[in-house]
Image: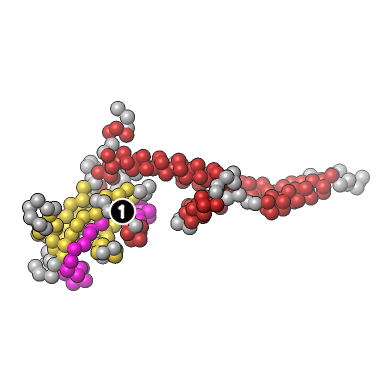
Amino acid sequence: MSEDSRLTPLAQALRAREREESERLDERWDRLAAGELSPAEEAELAALAETSPEMRAAWDAFRPLGPDFEARMAARLGAGTESVARPSPPAAPPAPGPLRASRRPWGRWAAVAAALVAAVALYLGRTPPLPAEWARYEVELAGGRVDLRGGPEEASVPTFGPGSVLSVTLRPPTALDEVPEARLFLERQGNFQPWPTPLTALSQGVLHLGTPIEGEVAPEPGEYRLWAVIGRPGRLPSASELSALPGASHFGGRHWIAWRKEIRFVDEP
């Protein structure tokens, strides 16, 4: 049995998306370096370069340097060759120093470019997938009452009022050695706000938050969506990134996974 066949459907989808994105990006960067991209494709990569320092590094590394740069470098190398070929005074043998000096700028540039290309290739092609166990976290809401919209056949909505305690627990399927970073957001009509209190990492990878609904931690009454996001440290999505996602109960990216739960706040206990 293959490794992918043992993963849950969500984990398989994340793994397939990772491979597809990596292959597509690798192919476009190679074509950029070869000068084979259409103007529209090059504009897409230029826009992608503004999304993160890593993408900017990829743009700088793979973008063709242009004829002006090549002409200047050729002129410098040619000038260095001429200086070596010029006869030296009979009293002293020809010194190899000018040749080495004329080639050093090119050597330094080539070394920096090679290191940058290697770093970009590492980022694009070798970023490991998220642990499969992360996609199998369970998000549990507790501490409020349950209201039924439209009758028992409709989905229940956890409801919280003054004095109740919002309890959110993210529970992995098995004990984890590597615990992801986690964050909660509250969304209403497309507006996102980070939840004011953080999740706490407990033993075996469990993440938990318990917040009394009172004072400043008391949203206006109404229907909301509570987002629970986990991912690599420092790589969680922003509120604007979450607002661009389509309607579904959970999502996965290269560095993070998000779940969305319906929740309701009222102004009476």
Relative to residue 76, is residue 247 drawn left or right? left
Relative to residue 250, is residue 240 drawn left or right? right
- Disc 1: CA contacts within 10 A as few (<14), some (14-19) or many (>=20): few
Say if the magenta span includes residue 235.
yes
Q: Residue furthest bottom?
A: 215
In this rendering, is residue 215 above or below 33?
below
Relative to residue 55, is residue 130 drawn left or right? left
If the image is split into quadrants, where does the C terminus sit? bottom left
Three-letter code for the amino acid on which mark 1 is drawn: Pro
Q: Which residue is mark 1?
A: 246
User: Whole-percent x and y of residue 204?
Assistant: 23, 45
Q: Which residue does the image show at 79% across and 46% down from the upper left?
A: 81
Q: Which residue does the image show at 10% across and 57% down from the upper left?
A: 150
Chain part drawn in magenta: 212-238
User: Whole-percent x and y of residue 167?
Assistant: 17, 57
Say if the magenta span includes residue 9.
no
Observer-nearest residue: 211 or 159?
159
User: Whole-percent x and y of residue 29?
Assistant: 52, 45
In this rendering, is residue 42 above or below 188?
above
- Per the image, label 1 sits on a secondary structure element best described as loop
User: Whole-percent x and y of residue 176?
Assistant: 27, 43
Residue 172 visible (yes or no): yes
Residue 146 visible (yes or no): no
Q: Which residue does the image show at 91% across and 47% down from the upper left?
A: 89
